Image (cartoon, rainbow, N blue to C red):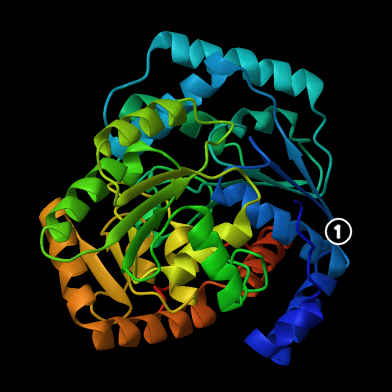
């Protein structure tokens, strides 16, 4: 079921009227009012969720904002998934066929999708080649918004991609550690965000949470450990299962691994099948294939959890961490990508580097609920200050102001405190 969008006025009780006034002032000072966002899918990932929220808010501010999606086939998405893995791991994974499939489908999209707007946000590698439509000699500005970790990429894939990126007017990364010294365009840092008013994050009555637990056969009398994410090797769901098995030898608890399959991720079904096999014979491990737009159920599962895990071994940012922290849940997460911006070790959760470390922290929090409560309380305030959609919108407006006034200076925001 499609969710409603919220007006800026509705965010005032959470973020304050001053920030809303600042957003209006910034938008008024942007000279080119039409904005287009382009990515590769409308569902199944954090980018799509953010755009679903951001585009209407931009329109409310007086901008003419829209969102379009490129088309892909199996070969194209296999190529871009290979690029994704090569960029995040540094491994030489891409074949010449991958590069050829990427260029073939890019050329088709250039023919079929007309890019119009004063400011164009192109999200991630999949549509990067659309820069070929940039109108030279006009006041049109193109921004490549990278949501993945490119701090130590495979050189072949990065060199191929950088040929496109260096034609943009600016690039945007999620953390300072992702910045690239070999790019010639200005680089900005804008962390992703969650919407506190969305179905996935809003307060829920306990009666609804109990109904969701009952639907999935979960025992509300046992502590619940949950990881919500796409079925992706980088999220290490099998590592989560192995850590849980160590914990369950000592504490009677349950594990939920829940997620969906993204349209642009051909590996998802394969990973899901391996996760199901790893959980065979365990009544205390629940593998949930949750369809898109099940945000209320995801919200309920996170709120019902004693601990939320995001044991990524590679991560762009990991918005499920911010979602859990906003619900005052303690988080145990991999020390990678943008996660350390959200999980301040010992303050809002715990960062871990291996299965044994994850299991140790799970046992510790289950045996020390007072510590879990303190971490969750700190985490909610940390998200309120740093990772809500209104801050995200403000920083996009600042990037637009900078590059449209031709005063773009490479700007890397400091880490959240």
Quadrant hosting residue 135: top right
Quarter of the rendering occupied by the C terminus: bottom left
| Labels in figure, total | 1
In the rendered view, would you say 412 is above or below 317? below
Tell me what residue is drawn at x 37 percent, y 19 percent. 94
Tell me what residue is drawn at x 40 percent, y 79 percent. 379
Tell me what residue is drawn at x 62 percent, y 28 percent. 129
Tell me what residue is drawn at x 31 percent, y 69 percent. 223
Q: Position of residue 288 (x, y in %)?
A: 46, 45
User: Between 323 and 254, which is closer to the camera in this rendering?
Assistant: 254
Q: Position of residue 240 (x, y in %)?
A: 26, 50
Disc 1 element: loop
Residue 413 visible somewhere in the drawing:
no
Residue 35 visible somewhere in the drawing:
yes
User: Between 5 and 89, which is closer to the camera in this rendering?
Assistant: 5
In the rendered view, would you say 248 is above or below 153? below
Q: Position of residue 413 (x, y in %)?
A: 47, 70
Lateral position of residue 226 relative to residue 28, left or right: left
In the rendered view, would you say 51 is above or below 86? below
Q: Mark 1 points at which residue?
A: 33
User: Between 120 and 3, which is closer to the camera in this rendering?
Assistant: 3
> Callout 1: few (<14), some (14-19), or many (20+) C-alpha neighbours within 10 Å?
some
Lateral position of residue 408 relative to residue 378, left or right: right
Q: Position of residue 350 (x, y in %)?
A: 24, 70
In the rendered view, would you say 181 is above or below 397? above
User: Between 398 and 289, which is closer to the camera in this rendering?
Assistant: 289
Quadrant hosting residue 110: top right
């Amino acid at each position: 079921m499609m969710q409603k969008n919220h007006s800026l006025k509705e965010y005032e009780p959470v973020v304050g009227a001053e920030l809303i006034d600042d957003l209006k002032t910034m938008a008024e000072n942007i000279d080119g009012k039409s904005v287009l966002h382009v990515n590769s899918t409308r569902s199944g990932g954090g980018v799509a969720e953010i755009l679903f929220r951001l585009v209407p808010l931009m329109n409310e501010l007086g901008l003419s904002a829209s969102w379009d999606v490129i088309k892909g086939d199996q070969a194209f998405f296999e190529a871009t998934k290979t690029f994704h893995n090569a960029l995040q791991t540094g491994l030489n994974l891409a074949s010449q066929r991958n590069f050829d499939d990427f260029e073939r489908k890019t050329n088709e999209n250039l023919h079929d999708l007309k890019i119009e707007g004063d400011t164009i946000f192109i999200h991630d590698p999949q549509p990067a080649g659309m820069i070929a439509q940039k109108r030279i000699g006009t006041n049109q500005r193109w921004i490549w918004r990278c949501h993945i970790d490119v701090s130590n990429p495979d050189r072949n894939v990065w060199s191929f991609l950088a040929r496109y990126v260096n034609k943009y007017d600016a690039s945007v990364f999620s953390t300072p550690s992702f910045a690239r010294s070999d790019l010639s365009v200005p680089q900005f840092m804008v962390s992703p965000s969650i919407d506190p008013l969305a179905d996935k994050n809003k307060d829920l009555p306990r009666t609804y949470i109990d109904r969701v637990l009952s639907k999935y056969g979960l025992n509300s009398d046992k502590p619940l450990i949950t990881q919500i994410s796409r079925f992706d090797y980088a999220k290490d769901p099998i590592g989560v299962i192995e850590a849980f098995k160590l914990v369950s030898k000592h504490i009677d608890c349950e594990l939920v691994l829940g997620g969906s399959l993204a349209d642009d991720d051909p590996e998802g079904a394969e990973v899901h099948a391996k996760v199901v096999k790893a959980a065979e014979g365990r009544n205390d491990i629940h593998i949930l294939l949750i369809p898109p737009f099940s945000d209320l159920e995801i919200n309920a599962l996170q709120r019902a959890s004693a601990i939320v895990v995001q044991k990524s071994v590679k991560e762009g940012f990991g918005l499920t961490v911010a979602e859990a922290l906003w619900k005052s849940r303690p988080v145990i997460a991999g020390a990678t990508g943008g996660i350390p911006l959200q999980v301040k070790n010992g303050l809002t959760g715990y960062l871990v580097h291996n299965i044994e470390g994850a299991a140790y922290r799970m046992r510790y929090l289950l045996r020390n609920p007072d510590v879990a409560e303190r971490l969750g309380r700190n985490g909610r305030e940390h998200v309120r200050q740093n990772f809500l959609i209104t801050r995200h919108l403000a920083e996009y407006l600042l990037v637009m102001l900078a590059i449209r006034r031709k005063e773009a200076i490479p700007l890397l925001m400091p880490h959240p405190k």
